[in-house]
Image: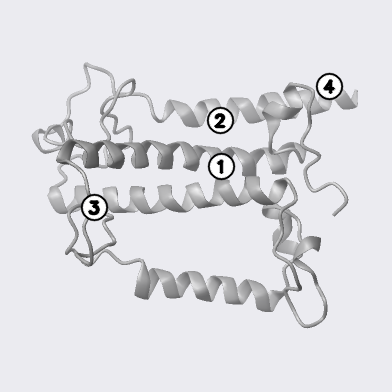
Amino acid sequence: RRKQKQRMKTVAALTLLAGSALAFAPQQAGKSSSAVSASFEDALGVQPPLGFWDPLNLLEDADEERFNRLRYVEVKHGRIAMLAVLGHIHTAFGARVPGNIDMSGTSFASIKTGIAGLKDIPTAGLIQIVAFIGFLEVFIMKDKGTGDFPGDLRNGMFTWKGSEEELMQKRAIELNNGRAAQMGILGLMVHEQLTGEPYVLNALCGVPSNFNAGL
């Protein structure tokens, strides 16, 4: 009965992620878009197999400024998600910073990975993390409008080497990896809450990750 309940949770999680993936499906051919949004159908990131998609009509009647704002947010969230997935995997297999997180002797090694770790971090530590993120957001990670594209945080400080085609390809790769990472970290968090095993493919293959075992 326990296995059946576990299987039902896994199926529910897969159904949730499948529903989220439908949001990335291209619009129906018969659905008209405005002349302005149509101008973005050849923008960077419109790639096979999905092509151009805007299920929430965020680009309907949008101008260039609106598009650039949305692209900046997409790039930023993609970068954050890539770091989140990397950090999740890195700590899930046991890597930890040496030493203690506070003066009372709470070691980094004793803090769980994922959402569960929030309960292990002292309140003062959480406040410092939020403050540091806020500092980066307000003062450091800012697009001042002097870059070559939305999300270009170099702000004219240095240049990348490569042809225009190579640079566009690398930007497209960053977009795709960021989009995948956003779905990836969402999946890890959902499965952690549903089953306690975020690496569901490991579990389905009979090789569980033993997530947070012993912590």
Q: Which residue is mark 3?
A: 160
Whether label 1 touches label 3, CB < 8 Å: no
The kind of secondary structure element at disc 2 is helix
Identify the mark nearer the N-term, 1 or 3.
Answer: 3
Tell me the number on the disc at residue 4: 4
Q: CA distance from mark 3 to mark 2?
A: 37 Å
Specify the quadrant that holds the C terminus: bottom right
Amino acid on which the number 3 mark rests in the picture = Trp
Q: Position of residue 23 (x, y in %)?
A: 41, 30
Which is more toward the observer, 107 or 38? Answer: 107
Whether label 4 touches label 1, CB < 8 Å: no
Q: Residues within 10 Å of mark 4 (few under 14, many from 20)?
A: few
Q: Residues within 10 Å of mark 3 (few under 14, many from 20)?
A: few
> Closer to the camera: disc 1 or disc 3?
3
Q: CA distance from mark 4 to mark 1?
A: 24 Å
The kind of secondary structure element at disc 3 is loop
Amino acid on which the number 1 mark rests in the picture = Leu
Whether label 1 touches label 2, CB < 8 Å: yes
Identify the mark nearer the N-term, 3 or 4.
Answer: 4
Identify the mark nearer the N-term, 1 or 2.
Answer: 2
Q: Is residue 19 above or below residue 181?
A: above
The kind of secondary structure element at disc 4 is helix
The residue positioned 65% from the left and 49% from the top of the image is 90
Most extreme residue toward the right, as rendered? 1
| Res. 48 image quadrant | top left
Tell me the number on the disc at residue 186: 1
Identify the mark nearer the N-term, 4 or 2.
Answer: 4
Amino acid on which the number 4 mark rests in the picture = Gln
The residue positioned 60% from the left and 76% from the top of the image is 127
